[in-house]
Image (tube, rainbow, N blue to C red):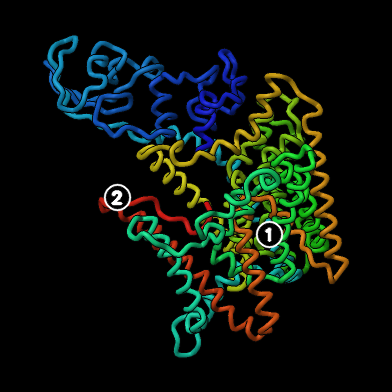
Amino acid sequence: VPLAAGPAWLLRNQPALAPFAKEGVNPPFPRAMFLGLPEHGQADPNDPEYRYVIDGYHGGLSKREVVVHRAVVGWRDRHGEHSALALGGQIAREREPGTFLDLDAPLGRAMDGQAAGARLVGPDGDIEILSVAPPGIPWDQWLRAGLAWVPLIGATLVCSLAMAALVRQQWIVNERLPFPIANAITSFLDEPRPGRRFAPVFSDRTFWIGFTIAAVVLISQGLRAWGITTISIPTNLAEVGPVSLAQVLRGGFWDQAYAGEWGLYQWRVYFSIVAITFFLPSDLSFSMWFFFVATNLVYMALRGSGVPIEMHHASVAGMGGFLVQCLFILWIGRGYYLRLLKAAFVPAADHEIRVGAVYARVLLIGMVALVITLVGMGAQVHHAVLAMLINLGILLVLARLVAEAGIPFVNAPTWWPVNAVIMSVTGVSAPAAALVPLILLGATLCADPRENVLPFAVNAEYLGAKARVPRLPWSALLLAVLAIGTVLSAIAMLVMNYHHDGQSARDGWWPHPLLSGLTPMATAASVGVDPDADTGNYLAYAVGALITGGLGIARLLLSWWPLHPIGYLISMTYATVMIWFSFFLGWMLKTLVMRFGGFALYERLKPLALGLIAGEAVVAGLFLIAGLIMPLLGITMPNSPRFLPG
């Protein structure tokens, strides 16, 4: 939703896009997919319709009952009572006169800005304004734009569900990945013991100890955030005491980390992260915090020695690692995937392969549909294929991270987003109108990889397998839920932004996925293409690919190898910056338990870890619900507290 109303607003407010905002230049956007852009030339930010649709979305619509563009006005004059839609600007000039209240005509100018109940003198005598209904959400315009997005969004959702179904057998049965999140969920849904109504974990005293610990700590923080109490139990251990660790480790060498003051020097405890890490194999849980610390220390040493390495290079290297990890995923399952691909064209005897072949066909159709959609928007065919493969490949790796490591809060390398990868691979020498379609997927469903579909779908497939739900109906249900959820979330966002304080006040991050692709295009349009501009990035890609490849090969060939490539892949992400210390705590607690209590104590403490997860989830849910209900009751409360990083 922010993307559809984004370009018209960004062209006016982002200096980096100035080459596309010049008078006489046609901005390189598919017009049907975006609001506020005329068929030719630049949008007029002073036009009432622009202010209504675009500024209304980004800043909120006025609730005052005054005569403005798109308000429905009732008035009385010497001819009787009238009611009409008030219009001004270009749209008024295109309408048939007499079918609306023209705010650019003498009568409309006299009434413009007047409130209900006002009495004034118009061009034809006295006027009394009887009623004013403020402008509503421009549903018709959003519906047209939304329908234009259906092929792109729909094909991506179909591809995601098909990929989740294709890896199901390989990851669950053949590779036996742990699926920590899904297994935690099934622990709460297990069959109860005879005479009990709930899963066995709820009868375990240790579970309730963990639940109570998380609940007490988080409730204390929530009540303090709401101003009800003045004290709380802190969960950032680096800020306990009169001086925070970030204040102590400041200046010189300590400032050279790529995530120091707000990451490496912040020791945040998130109960669910600690608990899930407690369930992981020790080599994986160790790697998940070790590589974050190690890569920051390497950065500090290199930058301290004068090496011209920039903060985003860590993320560029991470994307190089994502490419290699994607190849590893496909290589490990190559036998199974090739059987499915063959069965997509030649019927197989095995029932499981026949079912998988259905999903292989769906994936191929979805991929072709994505390419056709991008080409239809103006992209070149080979660029469309590259963009499609990059997006789906990154989603596949993220799904693997969730299935194997169970990280509920994970994203791709933060400072080098999907669109930056696409632009660095395709280059920016093609016309901007042929490049813009390539970044649309990276600015929507792949814009924030913490919230993409594929990892959720993979966990859903695991739960479906555990429950022995028929596969094809299960996939159809998932697709229906996704479609309904997409529509409902879009409606909710429009209502929140138009009827409240707007998108700009709500989230300042939303332009970045779009700008990460548009800025290189605008720079090329302004100063030309620099063939040496990406040299450092290509080197970083190579470094990340070599590190991930070395770690992956060592893990495959050496049974004693202690480091997992997943640890490196997540080290330069915003998620790990925020939760790395919780990884460390989970690893340390499991190491101590296994060292001094053995496997028996570890098994005994599993319900406690589940209690931490449940306690955090329940308290967060209660505060969320309270934050939604209280304003409806006329109770003004501060913002709801956050118990996980946003």
Residue 158 appears anywhere in the view: no
Relative image position of residue 425 (x, y in whole percent): 77, 36
- x and y, in percent, of residue 601 in the image: 63, 84
Describe residue 296's horizontal placement relative to residue 195 as left or right.
right
Residue under the image location 43 percent in, 55 percent down: 641
Which percent across, then down, holds residue 322? Answer: 75, 51
Front residue of 126/32: it is 126
Residue in the picture at 48% in, 41% down? 507
Q: Between marks 1 and 2, how big is the CA–CA gap?
A: 40 Å
- Residue at the image position 19 percent from the left and 9 percent from the top: 123
The amino acid at mark 2 is Thr
Q: Quadrant of residue 498?
A: top left
Is residue 644 among the parts visible in the rendering? yes
Farthest right residue in view = 557
Q: Which residue is mark 2?
A: 636
Whichever of callouts 1 and 2 sits on the residue coming sooner in the sequence is 1
Above/below status of 590 relative to 577: below
- Dot 2: what SS? loop
**Residue holding disc 1:** 401
- Nearer to me, 359 or 420: 420
Q: What amino acid is at disc 1?
A: Leu
Look at 67% across and 64% down and name the residue there: 405
Residue 341 falls in image quadrant: bottom right
Badge 1 crowding class, 10 Å Cα cut-off, few under 14, some 14 to 19, many 20 or more, is many
1 or 2: mark nearer the eye: 2
Instruction: Indicate the quadrant where residue 16 lies.
Output: top right
